[in-house]
Amino acid sequence: MKKYSGIFSLFFSAILASATANAQAKIDSKAEAILTTMSKRYEDLKSYKANFDFATEGGKNIKGDVTVKGEKFRLKVAGQEIFNNGKTMATYVKETNEVNLQDYDPAELGELNPTRIFTAYKKNYKYRFIKESKEGGQTYETIELAPTTSYSKIATVRIKVNKADKAIKSWDILMSDGQHVSYTITSFQPDVSVAESYFAFDAKRYPGVEVVDLR
């Protein structure tokens, strides 16, 4: 069940880093202004769906998507899905046709919680404006974040934000162990209309699935 857990951890840690506009280490007013506006853009959404590409240095691109609505979310990437209907969290692995069920605890999920990553007031990051660049007719602003704690698994995160609407384009992450990964948002749908049942795992849709109930 843990084959792709590192992908999930890196993905949410990356988004978390981008939402640290209220971090205590405020040393760059331009970077702070960009992050604050960017963060508010996502905080105001009732729901959203994002498609993304995940890539490691020298590795192939992996496509995924995440849908969030209030306390509910559903993440799909690399043959694995996480369902959360606000009460139960289910992690399904296609390769083994197995699902783990557990009670949803927002506090326990911590920084891996995609429903709170743009609203949490996180500490222990400093940030600075790096550059402004143009790509495909769009202007992007790049901000670099670095943890102020020595035990962080992240060394630096470079976030590319669209200057016009403050939408996030990509994250470029350097891990403390030297691993380099990146995430690029390929499409983003704000305030999507999605049924509540979309966030609940339905065993009937997965014939022969092995259910491991950890509740």
Image (tube, helix red, strand yellow):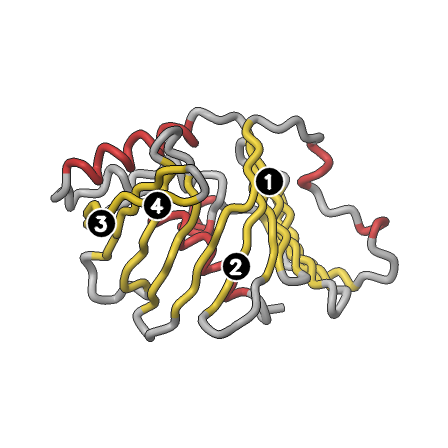
Tell me the CA gap for discs 4 and 2. 16 Å
Horizontal side, residue 57 vs residue 141: left or right:
right
Name the one closer to the observer, 198 or 90: 198
Q: CA distance from mark 3 to mark 4?
A: 14 Å
Tell me the element at label 4: helix
Q: Which SS class for mark 3?
A: strand
Tell me the SS state at disc 2: strand
Q: Quarter of the image for the N terminus: give it.
A: bottom right
Q: Residue at x 30, y 42 (%)?
A: 141
The residue identified by callout 4 is 18
Q: Residues within 10 Å of mark 3 (few under 14, many from 20)?
A: some
Q: Amino acid at mark 1?
A: Thr
Badge 1 marks a residue whose secondary structure is strand
Q: Earlier in the sequence, mark 4 or mark 2?
A: 4
* Mark-to-mark CA distance, 4 and 1: 18 Å
Disc on the earlier residue, 2 or 3: 2
Q: Nearer the viewer, mark 1 or mark 3?
A: 3
Amino acid on which disc 2 is placed: Phe
Disc 3 designates what residue? 130
Query: Pointers 4 and 1 in contact (CB under 8 A)?
Result: no
Which mark is on residue 67?
Answer: 1
- Residue 15: x and y in percent read 41, 48
Is residue 191 placed above or below 181 in the rendered structure?
above
CB under 8 Å between discs 2 and 3: no
Quadrant location of the C terminus in the rendered image: bottom right
70 lies left or right of 100: left
